[in-house]
Amino acid sequence: MGTILVTGSLGQIGTELVPLLVKKFGPSRVIASDVKSPNSDIFHEIEYVPLDVTNRDLVASTLKERSVTEVFHMAGILSALGERNPELAFMVNSVGTFNVLDSAMKAGVNRVMIPSTIGVFGKDTPRDNVPVVTVTRPTTMYGVTKVNAELLSAYFRSKFGLDVRGVRYPGIVSYKTPPSAGTTDYAVDMYYHAVAGKNYECYLKEDAALPMMYMPDALDSLMKLYSADEGRLRYTIDYNISAFSFDPRTLAESIRKVIPDFNVTYRPDYRQAIAETWPRSLDSTDAKIDWGFSPEYDLDAMTEDMIRNLSEMHLKSQPSR
């Protein structure tokens, strides 16, 4: 049996995906990688290799030398950072994805998993219950590069028979990774502030509704698609998935059911313009039919779990007296 390589293993999804893969396949089969080294020994059970996906020769040699048979390509630059540094977003998201697909095809890799995003949608896309096949004309570099990734994946599948799979992730909420450079990361940040006893100033408008999902469901969905019968799959990395949609006001109300004194104010910035190009809700029917997409958490269940886990983390971080 070959090995499973995870690129971008230090990102929001990667840091939780790697332990899941280790649990499922064993530490000897999983290799973690990222452009930088981890600050702590979070991957002590498995091999870790520095890997810049924009370096085509390094990607190719890594796949070959380590007998990689499956790749989870999680390396990517998110929406907000992509607007601040569009060249970096293009290099990582477009050039990096081509390098992974081309190297995987030449190395005889069995399967490549690549996440896409609601960022592929734009102002011309319907706002509600958006299907898989629709207008994808994004106005951000993040979206442009992810549309490119979807088309590249379909090309490598039809031209070379490479088994490429993935989902269009909505905003993902997780307590294990602090908020970073995503437009939907306000949700994670709101939970962090609430548990710390702080009020929150939101950079989106209170009614900016977006599709969202809790991390356990996001990982479960990826693994269900990974294990699905290839003959049932009608799409490559463009399956829509979403557990629910909410806006900042609704999330704050859910949090106040547990932390009544929590308060949110609103000061929209450039990320509001990004959010306005994305749909309010997605149609996930194709994912349900083709490979059994079935999220477990609703908004209030996610809130209760987030606050419980963040509260435990907050207590552990306090100095002992």
Image (cartoon, grey):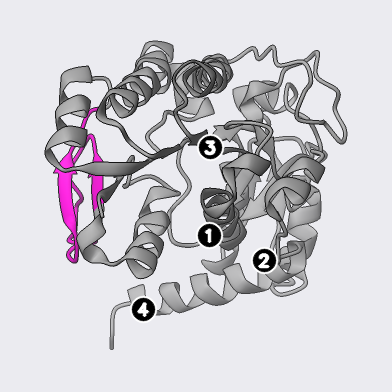
Instruction: Report the number of discs.
Output: 4
Q: Is residue 278 above or below residue 70?
A: above
Q: Determine which quarter of the picture holds residue 316.
A: bottom left
Which residue position holds label 4? 316
* Local secondary structure at mark 1: helix
Q: Residue at x 71, y 75 (%)?
A: 258
Q: Residue at x 17, y 64 (%)?
A: 44
Secondary structure at numbered mark 2: helix
Q: Earlier in the sequence, mark 1 or mark 4?
A: 1
The residue under label 3 is: 165
Label 3 or label 4, whichever lies nearer to me, is 3
Q: Could you tell whether 27 is left or right of 112 in the image?
A: left
**For residue 162, side relative to residue 65 (left or right):** right
Residue 110 in the figure: left or right of residue 201? left
Earlier sequence position, callout 3 versus callout 4 = 3
Q: Looking at the rendered structure, which numbered label has been put on residue 247?
A: none
As helix, strand or loop, the secondary structure at mark 4 comes to: helix
Residue sitting nearer the eye, 199 or 37: 37
Q: Position of residue 35 (x, y in %)?
A: 23, 34
Q: Which residue is mark 2?
A: 302
Picture coordinates of residue 300, whole percent (x, y): 75, 68
Q: Which numbered disc flags the more N-terminal residue, 3 or 1?
A: 3
| C-alpha distance separating marks 2 and 3 | 27 Å
In the displayed structure image, the side of residue 107 where residue 295 appears, left or right: right
| First reached walking from the N terminus: tag 1 or tag 2 | 1
- Tell me the CA gap for discs 1 and 4: 14 Å
Residue shown at the point (71%, 56%) measured from the top left: 292
Classified by dominant secondary structure, the portion drawn in magenta counts as loop
Say which amino acid is labelled 4: Lys
